[in-house]
Image (tube, grey):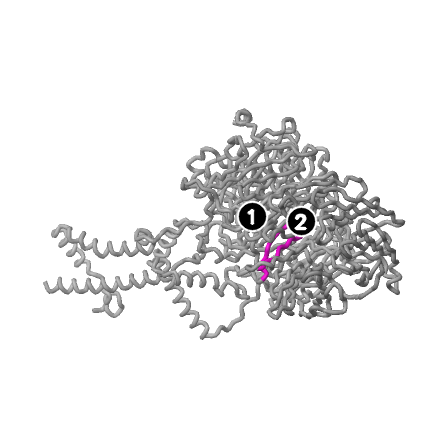
Amino acid sequence: MAAVTPLLLLLLLSSAPSFSSGSRNAYNINGRVKIPQGLGLGTKGYALPGRMSNVKVLLNGGQNITFLRPDGYFSFHNIPAGTHLIEVSAIGYFFSPVRVDVSARNPGKVQAALTENRKGLSELVLEPLREEQYYEIREPFSIMSLLKSPMGLMVGFMLAVAFLMPKLVENMDPEEMRRAQEEMRSQGVPSLSSLLPGGARN
Amino acid sequence: MAIMSFIFVFFFFSSLQPILSLYEDQVGLMDWHQQYIGKVKQAVFHTHKTGRKRVVASTEQNIIATLDLRSGEIFWRHVLGPNDVVDGIDIALGKYVITLSSGGSILRAWNLPDGQMVWESSLHGPKHSKSLLLTTNLIIEKDNSLIVFSNGRLNAVSCIDGEVLWKKDFEEESLEVQQVIQPPGSDFIYVVGFAASSQFETYKINAKNGELLKHESTAFSGRFSGEVSLVSSETVAALDSTGSILLTISFHNGKISSQQTPVSNLLEDSPGLAVIIHSSVTGIFAIKTDAATIFIRVIGEGKLEVVEKTNHETVVSDALTISEGQQAFALVQHAGSNIHLTVKPAHDWDSNLLKESIKMDQQRGFVHKVFINNYIRTDRSHGFRALIVMEDHSLLLLQQGAIVWSREDGLASIIDVTTSELPVEKAGVSVAKVELNLFEWLKGHVLKLKGTLMLATPEDIAAIQYMRLKSSEKSKMTRDHNGFRKLLIALTRAGKLFALHTGDGRIVWSHLLQSLHKSESCRQPIGLNLHQWQVPHHHALDENPSVLVVGRCGPSSDALGVLSLVDSYTGKEFSSLRLVHSVAQVIPLPYTDSTEQRLHLLIDADKHAHLYPKTPEAIDIFQSEFSNVYWYSVDDDNGIIKGYALKTKCSGNVADEFCFDSRELWSIVLPSESEKIITTATRKLNEAVHTQAKLIADQDVMYKYISSNLLFVATVAPKASGEIGSVTPEESWLVVYLIDTVTGRVLHRMTHHGSQGPVQAVLSENWVVYHYFNLRAHRYEMSVIEIYDQSRADNKDVWKLVVGNHNLTSPVSSYSRAEVITKSQSYFFTHSLKAIAVTLTVKGITSKQLLIGTIGDQVLALDKRFLDPRRSVNPTQAEREEGIIPLTDSLPIIPQSYITHSLRVEGLQSIITVAAKLESTTLVFAHGLDLFFTHYAPSRTYDSLTEDFSYALLLITIVALVAAIFVTWILSQRKELQDRWR
């Protein structure tokens, strides 16, 4: 895989002017963050500006920080040639860090790849891989959940004992039933009085 | 028995419910979050328009924020990068906040209402220089424009889109531009500066196109120093480098004329070295000497007159234009516990527009900065409000002689945190209170039941939420059984100590430390760290616990140290010491004296050890443990790690029986051409380990190598110590060591080729987890090393145990040269890290989770089981039962396990974990610019009922069961009777 990646990147290179040369061997990295609205739902709109204002773009682990313009574009200025890492911090979205190669030899070349899935990017357009839901979702009330709760199970068990057991007893063979009852009578039903010391004498 | 089995069944089922993380309505129950901005550097008011009145502030922590002027709440805020220092801010067009940052090379505009960045421009120039931002109402090509001087270039920038309209370079090597002035109503700009420190230069420039209209210069016999103060739009005042001659230079119409006045002419006594205070009040400027602040008025052609000389601490605001041609400025002076705020018109020193005296908390120190703003009262007179920044970095708004609001922004720069227990609850609670509580309790539970059964109305839900959040239980000032209520004691950079209640985050007390106060003998005091000095629990319960604050008088490590002892219940500083030695290291010893004061060893820069407290009792205790004291030092610059032990009493000239000489036991010298130390990590001193042995799948036992003397050291190739992307994988490597700090033995060494820092590491029990950057994969990686004691491995033979032929009872010593084996594994991790910590529980039984502070300022909890070196792609059935997760190449990020949920702890610096008394729970405190606190149960709260446990449902079930028993009993009786009649 590691060997394939550079090839993949070379194929995806385009001449999009994402990198423009600046002064003194320092380059600018320009890119764009796109946050589709309702990512999971398949509706493609774009996030509200209020939410966009809290998005940060970080270069090399926070060494440079920049912010998004209303249209989602961002730029880093005065970046030396080399391989860099861009991360996007946005609450509610998971972005893959992006490896960006700024070439000193041929400025104006894009070499960017998502590090999470090694996908090459022809343009520096960053989109979230997924939305992040920070809270557990409370399951709506249902009879099943109440029944499944320990209390529900207990009540259910009790009802089963109270109503099904007599049914089972009824379904027994009358002969067998009588035999069992006689057996019990011969053994003597342990009554409360027989358990008491005074009752034992009677 | 039935109840027992019932409870068992209940817990069995309840534990099946996945309640690993929070529900949205649980936010704020266990956690609190506070936002700060730091010490304000510059503030601009926005009060002209109707609507919400705001103040825009930039701070020393590189934050740009807008606050509500009524309440001090933050509307929005942006944290700029660590090198992106804000040089100037202003408001343009009444709707954009303009910031100039990064040494004048980045100009940004932010939308005032919501903080959205509107445009950003990068300004470059030929050389480094002072950066100046000037907003004008000049209209160039239909655009309102800004004038920015930075990096030796003057730029006119459009306010609308940030486009540079024209630029003009000032390339002269020696030219130092001091001021850029636009005389009101004119369409030209003066650029004023010094060339070669002795020439005064003025450039008159056409503001429409940047064309140079006139250039004049005059030589001056002396040399200029420091800043210039603008006296009028065509006059400046400056001081020469000796600080004894004042110059007033006017450049009316580009013609320079100057006047020299010796400072001694103005003042009878020689004031010593003076500096000009930067201010922009017309006709008046101020100079400051060691003892006094002197206000000087310029009358006519360069004539000077002293208007006031004060010996008090005085702060002046910038000038504020209150009406056409009229300026005002504010003065703040201290007088005892009050501060005097005076607003004067610029043209008349003797009259006051406003004079107020406000009582100020002594714990806030001196006023450092003042910003004023005016408003029109109903009777059409001018009212003033002042924003003041205090010595403890707090921000206050003064209006009509009172403090309208205050913000404790000192908490944005916490240096160190420790905790303290609260007082024990005294007996005797009134019955009436209990009865009320019982009723409330029942009512609460009925409401909760309604909530559970989804029968609650929206008002009920609101009432439930309010009840849960405002539970008085969590913010009481006494100890609780679970150990959730504690005091967090935080030392801030301003030298102030804060005690925060863990229940709701309120400030219980705050104290500006005397020992960290600037004084003659201690010019630049800085706080270093906090230690628990006295934690009474057995002998001295009537004593209050106290904390030790260690500081030093200057940034270098050989500066003299200062100590303070502070009572953690009241915040009183009961002892403050100036030391005669420096403080390089503080070692809390595991010994306490009869009053439960912990013995501390302070190591100075000359490697002498000093014992505190200085009592004969302490020395007695210490003498008996003399030979057991070891410590180490890490010299990052030279790559040397050394171990020390105590030798004898100090052989110095003074007989000090609390001072000891040290001897070097061992040293590890790393080759400086190939390795540079970047990170070290040790175990927490108070960490408890429950078991030494680890049972593994096939009924085998592995013994953990648990030593409190374990040190983790990470080194990188010197070339690769810079930022990511500066080196190729071939020339960078990361080497990690595990070292025993008593003997200096390297227990383990491992090299990661093609990797580089920054490294974040955490060491706990017998494992270390560290995070670094893998250049080959161009991804972050996390590695784990677990270390096991092989010499104890034979003990698993039962027969040996029976015969008594085992070494389990032999003492564990660093000198026994245990045979160790290590296991290691690496995984990819998506994010950069700012901090890493591990959960800490009181007995160490609960399984551990890593707390990872990501680059997005969130704290992620990651189960340690994901970092288990025994993970494999296809674990055997036995291993699966043991809980080993199949190996994946990267660590999962589960959004629900962010313990900060949807909040950010901006500028995250460190994560502190404290054990609660309840074994399942860790208290987590993350701080940076923001503070965040929560309770976290790594294996869920298995030892107590959760907060959302429904007692009412339990009661109802029990009642229903009892009723059912009776009903069935009656039914069975009746049936029996019928049977008998039959």
The majority secondary structure of the magenta stretch comes to: strand
N-terminal of the pair, mark 1 or mark 2, is: 1
Q: Residue B481 appears at what percent x and percent y?
A: 50, 62
- Residue stretch rendered in magenta on the structure: B53-69
Task: Place residue A77 in its image quadrant.
Answer: top right
Quadrant where the image shows the C terminus of chain A: bottom left
The nearer-to-camera label among 1 and 2 is 2
Residue at x 53%, y 34% (from the top left corner): A114
Q: Is residue B308 magenta?
A: no
Q: Which residue is mark 2?
A: B138
Left or right of residue B11: residue A96? right
Residue B61 on the magenta span: yes
Residue at image mark 1:
B116
Q: CA distance from mark 1 to mark 2?
A: 25 Å
Q: Residue B92 location in percent, x, y?
A: 62, 51
Q: Secondary structure at mark 1?
A: loop
Q: Residue B453: where, in percent of width, then height?
A: 34, 58
Front-lying residue, B889 or B663: B889
B614 or A55, which is in the foreground?
A55
Can residue A20 be seen in this snapshot?
A: yes
